[in-house]
Image (cartoon, helix red, strand yellow):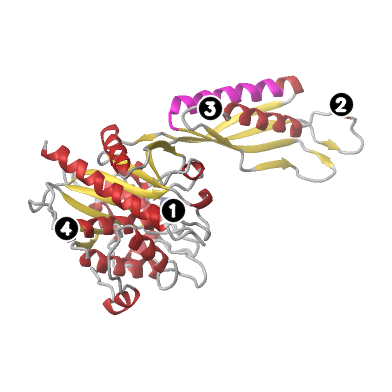
């Protein structure tokens, strides 16, 4: 089960004379953007426990071993490479991200963090460095949830927070996770054995593309993540009286449509210029019954509100809820706001974040702190150990899209920052 890659194919793809950490990571992401590392020709789709996933793990295992690591697959379908420290069996700094993709996704989302980890270890090995801790590179199998209806199953397994009932969920073809595990030579009853024991892993570093436009707008290659945003999902419903669009005069209507329009503008106003990365989105609107010639009886819409600090998010939700009720009262309508999901913020570790800022500064870049509006494996691993997260600028902030792009220079800078981070960590551990 600890398969190696096919050296012939890899060597053919990589006749690299001088090894440039970060630049090679990008090249490897590009190579993995096509079959056999993608399930489809002409686009990247690499879902959990597919043959594309297996091919990726075989080649990654080969690259890990070539970089000086031992590679193993754990009981959750993650690939883990280990570079021993000065003392055998020392606690590890875990470095990595996810290797799965969304359908027709980009080549760098997740994969770049894994490839950077391998480059960083190879740089240490080539320099003959043995640290007071081990470095492990992990390729999480499922972050996106693009095959099964749950995301981050693999990092949850590592953190020891996975619910074994996930085995019953099925993919679009009716294949259960348990069946997919078996087909991947994994024992579904041993999922929880992927959990790391306390003390085995003392810190986690995830490098990931920003998937947003902030760094590019400020002309910066790298960012240091302060926290993964707290998120609330709500459903809003305005109810009035359905009627004939031609025969009901304007002053005799109870139309929930304009009320919803007002309330959506209120959300925009409340979230604009907010602190702590506050953002609010209405992504789905439904007018009922939904016809050209009918005044709707009800309008429903979704609200997604996020901020780095839960209190900031909650204050915005409260303010917009008050507006919604005021608008309904003024227009003689009924209104309801229903909470669908409440995800806590996951702050990165302040100590590690400060080290990462110093590491970014050592590359000559101004260390820019920013929250992550999207969820990442790091927020799950925070239940296991302190975490830090490095963002890499991506073109136009575009992600989950084949147009996703990064530059070689930014990837090289990211690898350098990660190596500085390891230096800082070594200094801290020796002190
Ligand atoms: Zn990702």
Question: Along the horizontal axis of the image, is 358 left or right of 394?
Answer: left
Q: CA distance from mark 4 to mark 3?
A: 47 Å
Q: Quadrant of residue 354?
A: top left
Circle 4 sits on which residue?
Answer: 127
Q: Is residue 230 left or right of residue 10?
A: right
CA gap, disc 2 and disc 3: 38 Å
Is label 2 or label 3 in front? 3
Label 4 or label 3, whichever comes before in sequence order: 4
Give how far apart the Cα atoms at labels 2 and 4 are.
80 Å
Closer to the chain start, of discs 2 and 3, is 2
Q: Mark 4 or mark 3, which is nearer to you?
A: 4
Q: Residue at x 80, y 46 (%)?
A: 291
Q: Which residues are magenta?
A: 308-328
What's the CA distance linking mark 1 and mark 4?
A: 35 Å
- Residue 161 vertical position relative to residue 120 in the rendered view, above or below: above
Badge 3 is on which residue? 274
Q: Position of residue 138 (x, y in %)?
A: 28, 55
Q: Are marks 2 and 4 in contact (CB under 8 Å)?
A: no
**Front label number (3 vs 1):** 3
Circle 4: element type:
loop
Question: Disc 2 designates what residue?
Answer: 252
Gap between marks 1 and 2, in whole Å?
Answer: 49 Å
Q: Quadrant of the N terminus?
A: bottom left
Looking at the image, tell me whether mark 2 or mark 4 is earlier in sequence order.
4
Which residue corresponds to mark 1? Answer: 144
């Amino acid at each position: 089960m600890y398969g190696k890659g096919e050296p012939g194919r890899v060597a053919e793809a990589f006749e690299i004379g001088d090894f440039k950490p970060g630049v090679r990571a990008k090249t490897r992401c590009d190579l993995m953007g096509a079959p056999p590392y993608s399930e489809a020709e002409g686009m990247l789709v690499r879902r959990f426990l597919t043959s594309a996933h297996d091919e990726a793990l075989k080649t990654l295992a080969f690259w890990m071993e070539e970089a000086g690591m031992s590679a193993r697959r754990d009981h959750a379908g993650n690939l883990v490479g280990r570079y021993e420290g000065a003392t055998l069996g020392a606690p590890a700094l875990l470095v990595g991200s996810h290797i799965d993709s969304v359908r027709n996704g980009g080549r760098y989302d997740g994969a770049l963090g894994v490839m950077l980890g391998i480059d960083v270890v190879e740089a240490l090995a080539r320099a003959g460095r043995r640290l007071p801790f081990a470095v492990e590179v992990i390729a999480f199998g499922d972050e996106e949830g693009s095959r099964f209806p749950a995301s981050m199953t693999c990092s949850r397994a590592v953190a020891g927070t996975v619910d074994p009932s996930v085995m019953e969920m099925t993919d679009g073809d009716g294949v259960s996770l348990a069946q997919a595990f078996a087909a991947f030579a994994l024992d579904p009853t041993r999922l929880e054995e992927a959990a790391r024991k306390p003390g085995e892993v003392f810190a986690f570093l995830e490098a990931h593309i920003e998937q947003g436009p902030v760094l590019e707008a400020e002309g910066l290659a790298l960012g240091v993540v302060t926290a993964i945003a707290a998120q609330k999902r709500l459903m809003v419903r305005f109810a009035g009286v359905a009627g004939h669009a031609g025969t009901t005069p304007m002053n005799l209507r109870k139309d929930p449509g304009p009320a919803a329009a007002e309330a959506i503008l209120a959300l925009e106003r409340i979230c604009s210029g907010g602190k702590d990365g506050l953002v609010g989105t209405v992504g789905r609107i439904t007018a009922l019954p939904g016809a050209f010639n009918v005044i709707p009886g009800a309008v429903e819409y979704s609200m997604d509100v996020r901020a780095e600090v839960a209190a900031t998010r909650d204050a915005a939700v409260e303010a917009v809820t008050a507006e919604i009720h005021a608008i309904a009262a003024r227009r003689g309508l009924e209104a309801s706001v229903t909470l669908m999901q409440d995800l806590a913020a996951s702050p990165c570790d302040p100590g590690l974040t400060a080290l990462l800022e110093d590491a970014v500064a050592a590359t000559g870049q101004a260390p820019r702190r920013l929250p992550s509006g999207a969820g990442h494996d790091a927020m799950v691993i925070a239940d296991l150990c302190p975490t830090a997260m490095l963002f890499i600028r991506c073109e136009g902030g575009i992600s989950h899209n084949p147009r996703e792009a990064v530059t070689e220079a930014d990837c090289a800078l990211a690898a350098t920052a990660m190596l500085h981070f390891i230096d800082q960590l070594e200094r801290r551990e020796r002190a």
